[in-house]
Amino acid sequence: MMEPRGHAIAFNPTADLVHAHGIISDQKKVWGLRTSDCLPFIVLDEKNHRIGVLHLGWWQIYINLTSTFFNTWSEKFPGKNNLKLFIGPSICAKCFTFTGPKGWLRIILFYLSPLRKHLKKMEGKGSYIFDLKEALLEQLVSQGFSLSDITISHECTFENENLSSYRRERAGRKNSNFVVAGRI
């Protein structure tokens, strides 16, 4: 199980609970990732029996943690990799709003970043929305991945009441979404 902490990418961890934002492994092991509105991101190399799991919130998108992840992957597994990428259910663009003091900090950060085009002002409101999935896709394509190698879930954790959403449930949140991937 991975518990997102810091910005570390763990390689072949031995502990059952790993405090990192990503795991890269060629072990015969199953990894779980708990999310609520953030992007669960899975990388599979079926031919070479390798797996990667990454938890991506707005900050991890902002700092382009996928670049660090794939640099680590290339260091551990040099050569040609046939990777399949999966983006799981997360909050959609229209539901991911930035408001209040924390929101304004995020607005300024993204406004000044190369990801600015994924930040949009809501008509008639003083808030903005941000498209996490499109920002991630832009980062992946800039790293040389083809859209045909990427499978995207369009389920919105905020709109789908069968999924857990931090923004919908707030203090009453009792559940999380779990993504499980591994090699058995």
Image (spheres, grey):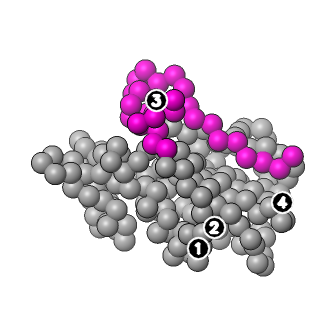
Within 10 Å of the Cα at label 3, are there few (<14), some (14-19), or many (20+) other Cα atoms?
few
Is 70 above or below relative to 108? below
Amino acid type, label 4:
His
Q: What element carries label 4?
A: loop
> Is residue 100 in sight in this rendering?
yes
Kindly identify the residue that appears in the image at 45 percent across and 42 percent down: 156
Which mark is in front, 2 or 4?
2
Amino acid type, label 2:
Asp
**101 relative to 153 in the view: left or right:** left
**Residue contact at pointers 4 and 3, CB within 8 angstroms:** no
Badge 2 is on which residue? 149
**Residue contact at pointers 2 and 4, CB within 8 angstroms:** no
Q: Which of 99 and 92 is in front in this view?
A: 92
Give how far apart the Cα atoms at labels 2 and 3 are.
Answer: 29 Å
Within 10 Å of the Cα at label 1, are there few (<14), some (14-19), or many (20+) other Cα atoms?
few
Give how far apart the Cα atoms at labels 4 and 3 are.
Answer: 35 Å
**43 relative to 50 in the view: left or right:** left
Specify start and end residues of the magenta stretch as a single range.
Answer: 155-184
Q: Which of marks 2 and 4 is nearer the N terminus?
A: 4
Q: Which mark is residue 161?
A: 3
Residue 175 counted in the magenta span = yes
Kindly identify the residue that appears in the image at 40 percent across and 23 percent down: 171
Give how far apart the Cα atoms at labels 4 and 1 are.
Answer: 21 Å
**Residue contact at pointers 2 and 1, CB within 8 angstroms:** yes
Q: Is mark 1 on a helix, strand or loop?
A: loop
Which mark is in front, 4 or 1?
1
Q: Which of marks 4 and 3 is nearer the N terminus?
A: 4
Badge 1 is on which residue? 146
Amino acid type, label 3:
Glu
**Residue contact at pointers 1 and 3, CB within 8 angstroms:** no
Amino acid type, label 1:
Ser
Badge 4 is on which residue? 49
